[in-house]
Image (spheres, helix red, strand yellow):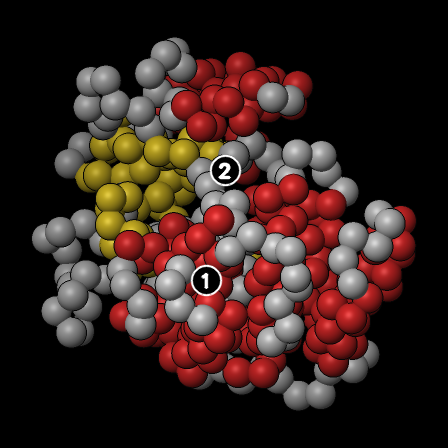
Amino acid sequence: MTLSGIVPDALLRRCLRSPGGRAWLDAVPGLLAARLAAWGLTPDVAPGSAAHAGMWALVLPVRRGEERLALKLSRPFPETASEAPALRLWGGRGAVRLVDEDAESSALLLERLDAGRRLQDVPFPEAARIWGALLRELSIAPDDRPGWDRFERIDAMAERWSDELPERWERLGRPFPRWLLEAGLEAAFTRGAVGRRGGRDVLVHTDLHGMNVLAVPEGEPAAADGGPSFRAIDPQASLGEGEFAVAPMLWNRLPELAGTDAPAALAERCSLLAREAGLEEEAARGWAVLREVENALWYAERPGHGGDLERSLWVASALCARLLPGLPAVEDLARLG
């Protein structure tokens, strides 16, 4: 199989910008052909259509007999190592069902969801209600099944950040005010392995934004209220407090806040998401501030991410009710994607 017309342009451009990306792209035809043969699959892409793409993954609609499935090939990254273990533990409840996997090629065979119907396109607050119910279903506690040792602990991550963030901030020339750094560190100290008091460890989809939640295809069982059922895809799974999951639903829908008191509206969204999922509102806000402070430093460390840096600083400072001066209006912030 050739790449012509199959790989979406956005994924193609990302891969061509790095030697590692180009090497993986060159290997994709062979990997696809091997998995199609091994699993008895045939491509199910309309002529002239491309496959679907994640940030670093190709998802090809396929058939096995009458069964409609999706073949996913991911460029190997540490973040992708938790995907298959998490999907096995969820077992199709709240997340896309894992049919088969080939760890050597980072290939997954998945049930096929409707890529044209995303939670991203459902208006708030209805999206918050669906998201909250989904997170409750995904928040399973550790049990005696294998695979739990594959996940990073979120409280240990926070503990590491509490040590690393001040050094990174200094090394980068203090790219934002100290008070914002300290706001993130307060959450790291409070929710980290040393300072944490209470809380329940669950399996957490740490990238649970609206573009990573898809509807089941029409004709399959609907939700209890008659609407479409939704399932999560692309988990970057960790183990810890469910409140860690709220942040991506805040930073991925910022343009919708135009024309409002945007910082106040963002804070209310954070609270609403937490309530719908049965989470602590203040813990959700603290985790979101910490995650965006860490994101801001990550962007500051890399050239060409000025717009992403501004977006992270906007979210973090808005959630502190102390919006930094000089940032773009919410409708002018760089968009994710």
Pointer 1 local density, CA inside 10 Å: few below 14, some 14–19, many at least 20: many
In x, y percent, where is residue 310? 62, 51
In the depicted structure, whether residue 246 falls above or below residue 173: below
Residue at point 60% right, 80% down?
Answer: 283
In the depicted structure, whether residue 180 falls above or below residue 233: below
In the rendered image, the quadrant that contains the N terminus is top left
In x, y percent, where is residue 210? 38, 56
Q: Earlier in the sequence, mark 2 or mark 1?
A: 2
In x, y percent, where is residue 336? 49, 45
Instruction: Check disc 1 and give the amino acid type.
Output: Met
Q: Which residue corresponds to mark 2?
A: 55
Residue at point 55% right, 32% down?
Answer: 75
Is residue 240 in sight in this rendering? Answer: no
Pointer 2 local density, CA inside 10 Å: few below 14, some 14–19, many at least 20: few
Of all residues shown, which one is farthest toward the front?
326
Instruction: Give whichever of 310, 221 is nearer the camera.
Output: 310
Instruction: Give whichever of 191, 281 is nearer the camera.
Output: 281
Residue at point 47% right, 22% down?
Answer: 12
Is residue 8 in sight in this rendering? Answer: yes
In the depicted structure, whether residue 209 falls above or below residue 8: below
Q: Can you tell which mark lies on residue 249?
A: 1
